[in-house]
Amino acid sequence: MVNVAIMGHGVVGSGVAEILIHHKERIDNSVKDDVNVKYILDLRDFENLSYSDKFVKDFNIILNDGDVQIVAEAMGGINPAYDFVKKCLQAGKSVVTSNKELVAAKGAELIRIAKEKNVNFLFEASVGGGIPVLRPICQCLAANEITEISGILNGTTNFILNKMIVDNMDFDSALRLAQELGYAEKDPTADIEGHDACRKICILATLAFGKHVYPESVYTEGITAITLGDVEAADTLGYVIKLIAHTEKLNNGKIKASVRPTLVSRGSIISGVDGVFNAVLVNGDQTGEVMFYGKGAGKEATASAVVADIMDCAKHLKARKYLFWEEAEENYVDSSDNEFGKFYVSLKSNDYGKMKNSFSEILMDNEMSFVENKYQNTISLITQPISKKDLLNKLENFEDCEIKVLHTMC
Ligand code: HSE
């Protein structure tokens, strides 16, 4: 028998319990063992479930029970998840988690403890919900040097942007709808400010490039400043706005990593990823581009990835899996100021004529694509390739002409 404890009975934890208990026969047949849910840790009472007898409120019951070999952490956040997970690993229990915040912040330390104790620490559900992406990167693409990963890693913001683009809904209304439909949390900060996508690209970059990438080192910008005017201007210019997470290996041993609203060409594959769906594009030197697509959030999708990790641990109780990486040196992630490319800029002025005369002069490019909105006194444009530093210097000149820079995007 393999005994499992689940910590947390929220959206993901309850999904894990339901799959393990209601589909026990299928899971046991696959693992070729009796996978038994022994405990579920939660401070709340759940009296009317078919498995109510499994609930405990004291973490030490799980920690001190030598028969529990695998622990699924589904509490979310850093505290007390970090302390509990660390203690379980130190006690020689394998741990699986969907907690991207924990893995992004503490993964290097936790994987080191797992290695020392010869147990597994798996977290497939932490990126892309139900989309298998971490295992494929580490195992199926193992013969490749991964050069770049980019994608849509947050379903809530993709849903909101999609509503703005397709239904002309403003940001606040689209966010409210996302909350009503259960996609966005009551406190949506982590999603709309880009922190959730940042944690996920950190995990992907860490696994792909072998050194831990911390969220603090990644340039992160959310979607709260995007207006319907931006969405319309992007559309006229042939683009859609998506929150894109990106990481790339540089020749100097460093990497680039960012999360930001980005203009994506309307014909590109990623522009068609709508609603709460996620897509991850991985570039390998042998395979070229590989794309993973599916539901990036939701109870069943996420729980299915957690249960798959539990099954993997149960099949490999005495063997460590492939995962390991190192701490990175200082400044491993290159500064976002060193960027070069085309930028979207939107400008506003009360003196529309003056703005029209001065904008091409300041940006010094006659071939620039631009959209005018005389009613809102705005001009939105796409620059020719330029370094971010040079662009920001040029944009300072607009202040002297009383032209406000509303937004810049890649
Ligand atoms: N809130 C996330 C999203 C799902 O909207 O994609 C959990 O990471």
Image: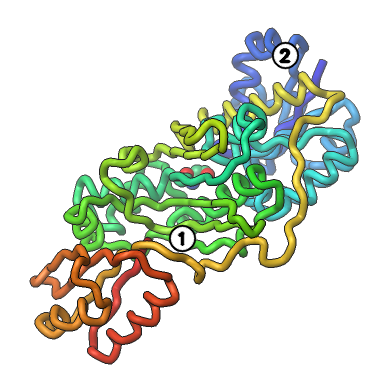
Where residue 185 appears, x then y in whole percent? 46, 50
Residue in the image at 20% along x and 63% along y: 369
Viewport quadrant of the C terminus: bottom left
Tag 1: amino acid: Glu
Q: In this view, does 55 lie to the left or right of 409?
A: right
Quarter assignment of residue 303: top right
User: Looking at the image, what colour scheme do you see?
Assistant: rainbow
Pointer 2 residue = 31
User: Mark 1 = which residue?
Assistant: 193
Residue 176 visible in rendering: no
**Residue reaching furthest to the bottom:** 400
Identify the residue at horizontal 26%, vertical 64% (top origin): 382
* Residue visible at 76% across and 13% down in the picture: 34
Q: Residue, x 9% and y 71% (percent of image)?
A: 375
Q: In this view, does 297 lie to the left or right of 31?
A: left
Write down the quadrant of residue 277 in the picture.
top left
Q: Where is residue 349 in the image (x, y as percent from the top left)?
A: 18, 81
- Can the viewer see residue 242 in this picture? yes
Residue 320 is drawn in which quadrant? top right
234 to 367, vertically: above or below: above
Total number of numbered discs in the rendering: 2
Asked which secondary structure carries label 1, the reply is loop
Q: Which amino acid does label 2 sit on?
A: Val
**Viewer-side residue, 150 vs 63:** 150
Location of residue 401 with respect to 158 vertically, above or below: below
Q: In this view, does 236 lie above or below 87?
A: below
Q: Where is residue 77 in the image (x, y as percent from the top left)?
A: 64, 51
| Depicted 17 relative to depicted 238: above or below | above
CA gap, disc 2 to disc 1?
40 Å
Q: Nearer the viewer, residue 192 or 9?
A: 192
